[in-house]
Amino acid sequence: MSLDQIVNVEITLGSKSVTRAGFGTPLVLGPNADFGPDIIRTYTNLPGVAEDFETTDEEYIWAQRLFSQEKKPRQIMIGKRGTQVAQVETLTPTVQDSALYRVSIDGVDYEFTSDSDATAGEIVAGLLALINGDANCKMTASGTTTLILTADNAGQAHVVSATPNLAIVHTTPNHGVVEDIQAIQQVNDDWYCLILTSREEFDILQAAAFIEAVRKIFVAATEEASIKTSSTTDLGSTLKGKSYKRTALLWSGDEESGPDAAWSGRKLPTDPGSEQWRFANLSGITPDKLSATEQANLDSKNVNHYTTVGGVGIVQKGKMAGGQWIDVTRSLDWFTARVQEGIYGLLVAVEKVPYTDGGVTSLEAIVRAKIEEGIRVGGISREDGYIVTSQKVADVDPQLRNDRIFPDIEFEFRLAGAIGEVTVKGFVSV
């Protein structure tokens, strides 16, 4: 008989842990990467970037800005954009006399009613004339007995629908910035801030729409002149109108130097909640000279800008396109991720968390610990205190208990925020 049969000793090396989401890693997305089969790589310094890019490539310039700030990221990622492909839709009419044929492109309807002796040719010709006659439509129509719609800009996606008497075939799917981001996420999704080398408006709009649905942020830059005016159809107005809380637009006359990368590089290394994105001084970026009217127009559209104030170049105002402060979005993302990671980490680290008041208390403790962590870095206010509450197990719906779902752990706290402007009043007597 061996000793193992009497005394069995099992040792497990390591511990069960959950990967923590990072909030300091930017992803630069550009077209010049030559990674071979790779579509994304991680870099910890500029010499490493120089091994893969020419110094004239936007990706290198953006990386240089990221790594040259007063505070710099520990690592950055650079992703490769694929070849942009123009979307093509083919619509074939079912010929019907005196029938309505409707094509909708990006929410705009084009309607043609056939006559009493209809043919496929006249139906297609009628719709073709309507679509091509609209200067605002971003797709071009062609064809004789079938209607072919081709996107004007490769990589710009469009939503096309039609009445049932027009059969749609998606001949060529769009490939643009969203498809590039999705492909990169499949390989490595451990990044938080998207930065494009592209300044194309349709790229920015599509990336903004995509980022709004994920727990990440997007910092974009442009020098579109109309944004500084009272225009209501420019990029800044469009982003504001969509109330995006995850996209920040920076107006800069020095857009070719990567001001969006410089701004991100300066702020991403800070702990979420410990910073505000206003007042950042950007190394390598030339401040703009803007009139009071231009600044007011930019501010009214929640478009950030980089100017000299008191002899120092600073970014104003530090907002997302929808008006929310960038640091608020980042701080809430951090808190959400840490609570999720903490509770999930407990669930997988122990045999079970019992469905008892004691088990619920252990979950509450994790929420409290994350609030305290937020207080330590300065994102959450201690002065107002905080509250974490939950139901007693006896009060939980029996069906939820049977399904092993605990319904609500609730919390309340106030973000610490930041002081951005100060008013000083005084009285002086003689």
Image (spheres, rainbow, N blue to C red):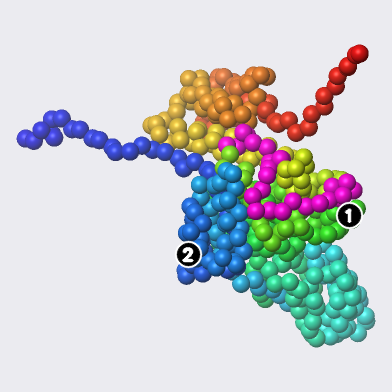
Q: Position of residue 422 (x, y in %)?
A: 79, 29
User: Is residue 139 inside the magenta stretch?
Assistant: no
Q: Position of residue 240 (x, y in %)?
A: 80, 49
* Residue identifier under label 1: 229
How much space separates mark 1 and mark 2, taking CA atoms?
42 Å
Which amino acid lies under the numbered mark 2 shown in the image of this protein?
Answer: Glu
Q: Position of residue 45 (x, y in %)?
A: 49, 54
Residue at horizontal 85 percent and vertical 74 percent from the top: 131
Name which quarter of the figure residue 165 lies in: bottom right
Q: Is residue 321 visible?
A: no
Give the side of residue 117 with respect to residue 65, left or right.
right
* Residue identifier under label 2: 51
Please tell me whether residue 134 is drawn above or below residue 25 in the rendered image: below
Q: Residue furthest right?
A: 116
Q: Residue furthest front?
A: 430
Say which element carries label 1.
loop
Task: Work out whether residue 374 or residue 111 is closer to the camera in this orientation and state it.
Answer: 374
Q: How many marks?
A: 2
Which amino acid lies under the numbered mark 1 shown in the image of this protein?
Answer: Thr
Within 10 angstroms of label 1, few (less than 14), some, or many (20 or more) residues? some
Q: Which residues are magenta?
A: 271-295
Within 10 angstroms of label 2, few (less than 14), some, or many (20 or more) residues? few
- The quarter in which the N terminus is drawn is top left
